[in-house]
Image: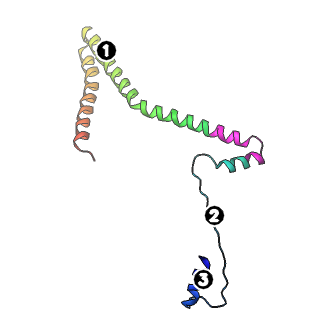
């Protein structure tokens, strides 16, 4: 096939008559992943004994670390809601206690601050739901 192509190019005048054939071959290899190609990993181990095991251990510890961070990232909003709810309940209980012990102004202040915060939270949640931007 290559000979036919060379002859066709000579016939069309796009190659001089004295042109010689050259066969060119190219090899391209790609590899994607968090670890080196197994052949390269073996080469690391040939250079430094145990290097391949160290690289694998490093990848394993990185994956464990990433999973811990993702778990914390998933649990973080729930922990915040729980802490806010417990804080609100403590303020309500403190306000009830202070109100029963005839300390009404402090009780109103203690219940007013978290109530305003909760009302603001509900308003922001409603606005965020209406405006998706």
Q: Which is more N-terminal, label 1 or label 3?
A: 3
Q: Quadrant of the N terminus?
A: bottom right
Q: Magenta residues?
A: 44-58
Left or right: 75 as drawn, with respect to 44? left
Element marked by disc 2 = loop
Residue beneath disc 1: 94
Using a 10 Å C-alpha cutoff, classify the residue at mark 3 as few (fewer than 14 neighbours), some (14 to 19) or many (20 or more).
Answer: some
**Mark 1–mark 2 CB contact (< 8 Å):** no
Task: Give the Cα distance between marks 2 and 3.
Answer: 23 Å
Depth order, front residue of 34/87: 34
Using a 10 Å C-alpha cutoff, classify the residue at mark 1 as few (fewer than 14 neighbours), some (14 to 19) or many (20 or more).
Answer: some
Q: Position of residue 128 (x, y in %)?
A: 26, 40
Magenta residue check for 60: no
Residue beneath disc 3: 6
Q: How many marks?
A: 3
Residue beneath disc 2: 27
């Amino acid at each position: 096939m290559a000979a036919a192509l060379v002859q066709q190019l000579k016939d069309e005048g796009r190659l001089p008559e004295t042109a010689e054939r050259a066969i060119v071959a190219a090899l391209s290899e790609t590899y994607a992943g968090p670890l080196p190609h197994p052949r390269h990993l073996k080469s690391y181990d040939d250079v430094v004994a145990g290097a391949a095991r160290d690289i694998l251990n490093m990848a394993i510890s990185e994956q464990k670390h990433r999973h811990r961070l993702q778990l914390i990232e998933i649990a973080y909003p729930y922990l915040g809601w729980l802490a806010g709810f417990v804080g609100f309940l403590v303020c309500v209980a403190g306000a009830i206690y202070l109100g029963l012990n005839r300390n009404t102004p402090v009780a109103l202040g203690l219940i007013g601050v978290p109530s305003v915060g909760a009302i603001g939270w509900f308003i922001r949640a409603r606005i965020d739901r209406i405006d998706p931007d």
